Every structure is written in structure tokens, then in C-alpha cells.
Amino acid sequence: MKSENQRLWAPWRDKYITQDIKNNKECVFCRMLKQKKDKQNFIVMRGEACFAVLNLYPYNNGHLLIMPIRHVSELEKMTPAEKKELFGLVERFKLILDEVLEPAGYNIGINLGHVAGAGVPGHLHVHIVPRWCGDVNFMPVITGTKVISQSLITLHKMLSDAYQRRNRK
Ligand SMILES: [Zn+2]
């Protein structure tokens, strides 16, 4: 029998993103970057080479995606500057989530390829999933889209504000 932990963590399949890709030939991440509607798209910040966005269908509260702005599919295709900024942002947002949501732990990872559960295999992204004891109850509870979008709006503001505060220091 699968443990609750495995069920939440693996596989990383993201049905909404897969469907979105089918409906729109353009990459979902590149499209949201072009739109310049960061609030509506839940983009928390844009850096020089990378950006952070809330996962619209989170596996847990605070589920963030950090990725290069450039459409790049493989780690080895990233420039040193992109790699540096990417990992710097992973660290920074881990600290921000510590401050804002105080989780007990994290799953941080990258899915490379469809077989590994990548919803958007063409545009590499790092998942940051905060974890709490007993958080397996999150998904059955948050099944309504309305509940998700409301919590995302609140969370987007909390994380953007925390990011701005840190940047000012
Ligand atoms: Zn892309």
C-alpha cells in the first residue's frame, strides 16, 4: 500500500497543465509571461532570468514553481546565470514560505520528461511544496475551484509582500 506521503508527492502529474497544453499550443508559462497580467496569473516575482509563480492547482498550500524565463527544457541547456538565479530563488522562497506559512518541511524537485510527471516538459520548473504533519487532508478538502482561487489570491499577496520586504532590506 502506498503511504500518504507518496500519494501526495509522486507522481507530479498536473492534469490542468497537461490539458492547458493540449488546448493551447503555446507553452503555458511562456504565455503567462507574455501576458503581463502577473496578478491574475499568480506570478509572485520576475527576476533577471527566472520567475516564481503559484501553481494554480496546488498539491498543498503554498505550492510554488520557480523557473527560467527562457523556454528551456533541460538543466544542461540553462546558462550559468539562469542556474544561479534559479537556485537562489528556490532558497529565497523557501525562507519566505518559512516566514509566511511556517510549514514543517518541504518537497523540492524537478520532473524531467512526461514519464516523470512533468506537465510542461518543454519548460523546466522547480516545484516547492510546503509540508505539514497531516497535510494529506488538504487535497480532499480543497476540491472546489473557488476555494483554491480565493486562497491563491490571498497567498499571492502574502508572498509578493514578503518578497518585496526582503528585497528592501
Ligand atoms: Zn515556455
Image (cartoon, rainbow, N blue to C red):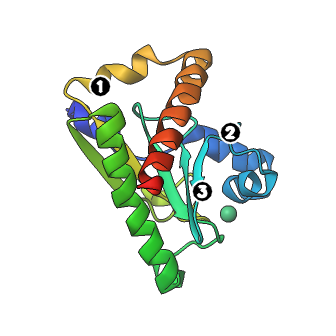
Identified by mark 1, the residue type is Val
Mark 1 or mark 2, earlier in chain:
2
Mark 3 or mark 1, earlier in chain:
3
Judge from the rendering whether residue 130 lies leftward or rightward of residue 162; answer left or right: left
Q: Could you say whether the residue bearing mark 3 is in a helix, strand or loop?
A: loop
Q: Which residue is mark 1?
A: 136
Quadrant occupied by the C terminus: bottom left
Looking at the image, do the residues carrying marks 1 and 2 touch, with CB atoms under 8 Å apart? Answer: no
Judge from the rendering whether residue 38 lies leftward or rightward of residue 141; answer left or right: right
Spatial separation of the CA atoms under disc 2 and disc 3: 21 Å
Mark 2 or mark 3, earlier in chain:
2
Image coordinates of residue 115 in percent, x first then y, are: 47, 59
Q: Which residue is mark 2?
A: 39
Image coordinates of residue 35 in percent, x first then y, are: 80, 51
Identified by mark 2, the residue type is Lys
Decide if ligand 1 comes within 8 Å of the CB at mark 3: yes
Spatial separation of the CA atoms under disc 1 and disc 2: 28 Å
Q: Which residue is painted at 33% across and 53% down in the image? A: 108
Give neighbour class at mark 2: few <14, some 14-19, many 20+ (Cα, 10 Å).
some
Identified by mark 3, the residue type is Val
